[in-house]
Image: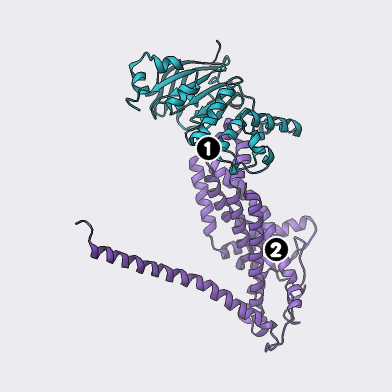
Chain colours: A cyan, B purple
Amino acid sequence: MKAYFKVRDLDLYYGEKQALNKVNMDIYRNKVTAFIGPSGCGKSTFIRCLNRMNDLIEGCRVEGEIMANGEDIYSSKTDVVNLRTRVGMVFQKPNPFPMSIYDNIAYGPRCQGLKDKKKLNEIVERSLKQAALWDEVHDRLHESAMALSGGQQQRLCIARAIAMEPEVILMDEPTSALDPIATSKIEELVDELKKDYTIVIVTHSMQQASRISDYTAFFLLGEVIEYDLTSTVFKNPSDKRTEDYITGRFG
Amino acid sequence: MLINAEKVKRNKAIDKAARMFFLAMALLSSSFIVILVLFIFMKGISPFLPNYQYGTVNLIDFLFGMTYRQDQKLYGVGFIVINTLISSFAALLISLPISVLTALFIVKIAPKQLSGLMQAVVELLASIPSIVYGVFAAGVLTDFVKWLASLFNVTTAGGSSLLAVILLLAIMIFPTITSMAITAIGAVDRDLEHASLALGATETQTNFKVVLISAKSGIFAGAILGLGRAFGEATAVSMVAGNKLYGPTFSLFDITKTLTSTMLAGLKETTGLDYDIRFSVGIVLLVVIFGSNWLLNLVKQKVGNM
């Protein structure tokens, strides 16, 4: 089984404060990898390292190495824009752009200079179908995306990421702002998407991690305490702290 | 017992009194607008009434007339309305892009200290009195216009011209629009920017395609405010407009005449019809402003509802 990301001895500092401590992890292709842990444990910080979104935070410093598909993403030769087209991201709060559904999906490809109307139409249709949103919106593609429900908006954001034909989709607590029905739709979608994409998901919900992920990493105070097959982490954890967390003794 | 019935009663009475007081204040300030409009309207409408003591003016001639000469008792403001629209919209056309790009630079691009400094400068510009802009325009802008005109072999009336008015207004409305644009751009959700960057868009693409698009409603509000200021500016405009008696003025180097300069010029040295008619011009100005606001708000709803 091949790893897409190989993370070696990753340290991350916000100014003086160390937020990640010697993180080592292989993230496998076409699998769903979940990060769990209490608030402030570094799971969101870590996922944002994978597409270098932490670059946007002032005073943030990264040491160590992340290889993505064999390329060191923190090397000075790496083009961040190029990296982000390969490693897409979906955020906690659905954040569609204030434009039409169509323009939302076409945004990424257009930024890469794609103007061909026919091609854009194809991309929009394919992305929305993959995100299981096409049937609900195909007759109002040119209406505002802001009129969609929260769950639909989040699937639109997934479709928007898919439109770039990325290799990886990072999801930072994608369902924490959604109701249970919308959440289960996103979970089904994630299961569908892993055929084509490598998926990394941060979640607050241990049930969600156990339902949808193949691998689970448990973070605590900036360290990876345990990283293994999801079934192993939940049924037979090797670290006492993992067991305490998943049985609800803290967090 | 923790709850004192007497005290509760008293607090309720105070609440009621406070509410009445606020209501009275609100009524006072809003009634002032009514009084003002009523006064202008009554005074401005009088020259068109049949029993007007200085000789009734024909309303159609007034509204659509293309000559305004006190000495011949010709009071037509049609061309003045057109002049006003031209100079104000042209000023907006120049000022809007500069303001928006400045605001974008201040909020998104400039380093913190520079951005703070520039914002202070913009606020300072907004607080400079119009008479100061006026003397600047009369002393500097007119020279510039004269020089520019000389390149085209055109002689101007000492630099007083439509172009001088446009440039002056563009400068004067710049801080208004910029402040509003700064607020609007600053209010754009950081999440949207992150979403754009995460899609592999560059910062420039993000700024233009997401930030400005998301802020367009606020920017538009700034444009409306700026246009209002351009329409209403009297003192400074009068200092560089000249006093064209007919029109409309389409040549940039020709003198012009706006609704405000018409109202202001010689106000204190005149009586009778020539005095009263300025109130009528005032009504026209109000209608022009309200009309433009209404029109722009329609456009704003059209573009802003995404």
Between circles 1 and 2, the one closer to the viewer is 1
Residue A61 numbered tag = none
Residue corresponding to mark 2: B85
Residue at horizontal 52%, vertical 59%? Answer: B127
Q: Position of residue A36 (x, y in %)?
A: 43, 24
Q: Is residue B245 visible?
A: no
Residue farthest along the right direction in this orientation: B153
**Please, what secondary structure does the residue beneath circle 2 have?**
helix
Q: Subunit of mark 2? A: B
Do discs 1 and 2 belong to a common subunit? yes
Labelled pair 1, 2 in contact (Cβ < 8 Å): no
Q: Is residue B171 above or below residue A181?
A: below
Classify mark 2: residues with Cα within 10 Å, few (<14), some (14-19) or many (20+): many
Q: Is residue A129 visible?
A: yes
Residue corresponding to mark 1: B191
Q: Position of residue B73 (x, y in %)?
A: 74, 82
Residue at horizontal 28%, vertical 66%? Answer: B10
Badge 1 or badge 2: first in the primary sequence? 2
Q: Nearer the viewer, residue B19 or B289?
A: B19
Q: Nearer the viewer, residue B149 or B50?
A: B50
